[in-house]
Amino acid sequence: MSSNSGQEKSEQPTDKRKKEARKKGTVTKSVDLVSAAVFMTILVAMPGVMAKGFQGFTHGFRSAVGVSTNNFSLANVDQVTRAALLPMLPPLIIITALAMTVGLVGNFAQVGFHLSGEAMKPNFKKINPATGLKRLFGKPAVFDMFKSLVKLFVFSWMVYSSIRDHWSELGMIWSLTPIQSMSLIGGLVRTILMRVGVAWLVLAVADYVFQKKQTNSQLMMTKEEVRQEMKDAESSPEMKGARMRMARKFSKMRLSQAVAEADVIITNPTHFAVAIKYEASKNHAPVVVAKGVDHLAMRIRELAKEAKVPIVENRPLARALHKQCEVGDFVPRELFQSVAEVLAYVYRTVKKVR
């Protein structure tokens, strides 16, 4: 932990931080989750596909025998090969299409459709030996090693337990017919694969959760970074445009309506009155929806009493807001704490939650 609390990464990443990281290719993704899903899909679809493939092989073999002749030539070999293999193509296409579809859906579900040009740019830091050693002994590498050992142990146990459960039947396999023997072995193999697939899915979900926490940990921010981002946002062209649109909106709105929609009126108490509205789901900061001095301040207080909007006396805050803000402006960063305390007091007293 850093001795400077301002440099400690204790703040959750903002939406802007996440978007920038996404552009660089830093996203939560578990390769194991996609691989396990593809494996289970192939395993579930395999019996039907194999049956169709066996029918295709039988049909192809018969066709090959039918078109074969005693004359050996390249044309004859090509004809026999086509007759034998073409009927087997549909099952192979089906299983390949299923695997590709599940793989694409699995990746899309984790990261969405995103092409990161920055992630594909050459980066010489990746071939730096010091960076490589850091990755080799870092938390992700240790977790990958632990995950591999767990998978090896779990999969080995699945194979052992399945064979143990069918050991008596396997001991009598010599007395069975070839069809019965193949059925027994096929059922055992399917049981083993199903158990391995389910265990793999469970481990893959745990891996995804770890990857998500790891990504979030990498994107954590210091308090100074959050303040700097808010400062940059306030001076950005987008924020200026939003302020102008909000100012036009409130200028068209009647004073009585603006006051009625406010959360609190902060007063001087007689000379100044500033109406504040805060919608956390829409705006990053409280907004000044109306303000006035002297007679207009009195009118705002009267409208607030009629609409039952809380009135809070805070002389320095009312003067500062009236001086620094126009109607439609967000509350300045240096006044956030004071306005937040007023809003908290209002919500706590009036039990009004927006």
Image (spheres, grey):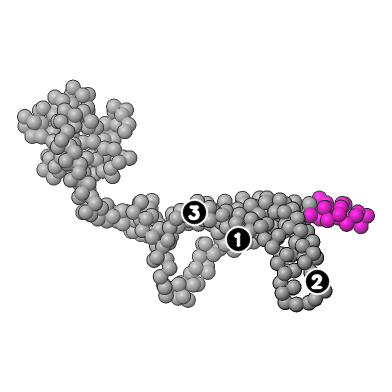
- Tell me if label 3 and label 2 are in contact, CB under 8 Å: no
Query: Which of 229 and 6 lies nearest the eye of the viewer?
Result: 229
For residue 69, which numbered disc appears in the image? 2
Residue at numbered disc 1? 146
Q: Nearer the viewer, residue 253 or 273?
A: 253
Q: Position of residue 29 (x, y in %)?
A: 50, 57
Farthest residue, direction top: 306
Q: Nearer the viewer, mark 2 or mark 1?
A: 2
Q: Which residues are magenta?
A: 160-186
Q: Position of residue 195 (x, y in %)?
A: 70, 51
Q: Mark 3 Cα within 10 Å, few/some/many (few <14, many 20+)? A: few
Query: How busy is the neighbourhood of tag 2: few (under 14 within 10 Å), some, or many (20 plus)?
Result: few
Position of residue 71 in the picture relative to residue 176 (left or right):
left
Assign a secondary structure to mark 1: helix
- Classify the position of the N terminus by image quarter: bottom left
Real-space Cα distance between discs 3 and 1?
Answer: 27 Å
Where does label 3 land, which residue?
A: 108
Which amino acid type is marked by label 2?
Answer: Thr
User: Label 3, label 2: how many angstroms apart (C-alpha)?
Assistant: 52 Å
Q: Position of residue 125 (x, y in %)?
A: 42, 73
Q: Secondary structure at mark 3?
A: helix
Q: Earlier in the sequence, mark 3 or mark 2?
A: 2
- The kind of residue tagged 3 is Phe
Residue 176 lies in magenta, yes or no? yes
Residue at the location (80% across, 71% down)?
69
* Residue 57 figure quarter: bottom right
